[in-house]
Image (cartoon, rainbow, N blue to C red):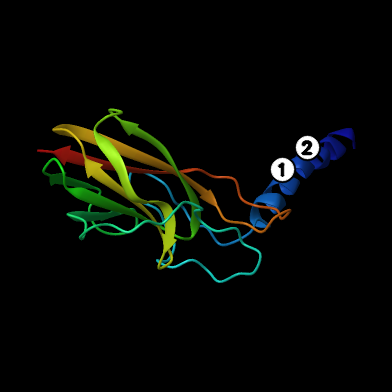
Amino acid sequence: MRLRRWRLSALAPLALATALLLAGCGGAGAVGGSGGAGGSASPTATPNLPPPCTGQSATLAGSPGATLRNMRGPTEVSLPVGAVVEIRLDGNHTWSRAAITPAGGLTPTGAQGALEQGECVWDFTVAQPGDSVVTFTGGARCPPNAMCPQYALLAKFTIHGA
């Protein structure tokens, strides 16, 4: 009899953890990896969700030399020094820029985390020859004070300055 009670009490925390994971907000599937994430191309119109990005929009003089996206399209490009690269991340997750390496390879220009047409947009000017890597981190968009799945996304882009 004691053995049977022990088994039930040992399974209770596992059942509770499974229920909590399944009760999270949204329907985020398996996402992550270098330059990729799951989900649809436009953010879901759900009330009380925080914006996916809260940066500033700015007008570019001309159009970007290339546009990179985490959902579709290339995640690396070769551009001459002085050209502008636009990076667009899906609006179904919250995004922030993690790093640019090397530090002087790209210069922020134009939009810096602005929400445009359902996507988060960052613009950079190629400042010097060589490879520059820009990384962003993402997570779940959930209403305030709601249960929310905990995961992290990494979007990584390589710009080859010529």
Going by the image, does 75 lie left or right of 52?
Answer: left
> To which residue does mark 2 refer?
10
Going by the image, does 152 lie left or right of 123?
Answer: right
Mark 1 surroundings within 10 Å by alpha-carbon count, few (fewer than 14), some (14 through 19), many (20 or more): few
Disc assigned to residue 125:
none
The amino acid sitting under disc 1 is Leu
Q: Is mark 1 in CB contact (under 8 Å) with mark 2? A: yes
> To which residue does mark 1 refer?
14
Going by the image, does 154 lie left or right of 24?
Answer: left
Q: Residue reaching furthest bottom?
A: 45
Residue shown at the point (60%, 58%) measured from the top left? 50
Quadrant assignment, res 155: top left
For the residue pair 145 and 61, the one nearer the viewer reads as 61
- Quadrant where the N terminus is found in the figure: top right
Residue 57: x %, y % from top left: 41, 57
Residue shown at the point (28%, 39%) measured from the top left? 107
Q: Secondary structure at mark 2?
A: helix
126 w.r.t. 64: above or below: above
Residue 10: x %, y % from top left: 78, 37
The amino acid sitting under disc 2 is Ala
For the residue pair 106 and 45, the one nearer the viewer reads as 106
For the residue pair 61 and 145, the one nearer the viewer reads as 61
Residue shown at the point (25%, 48%) measured from the top left? 75
Residue shown at the point (71%, 43%) measured from the top left? 14
Residue 22: x %, y % from top left: 65, 56
Quadrant assignment, res 51: bottom right
In this rendering, which labeled residue sits more in front, label 1 or label 2? 1
Q: Residue reaching furthest right?
A: 1
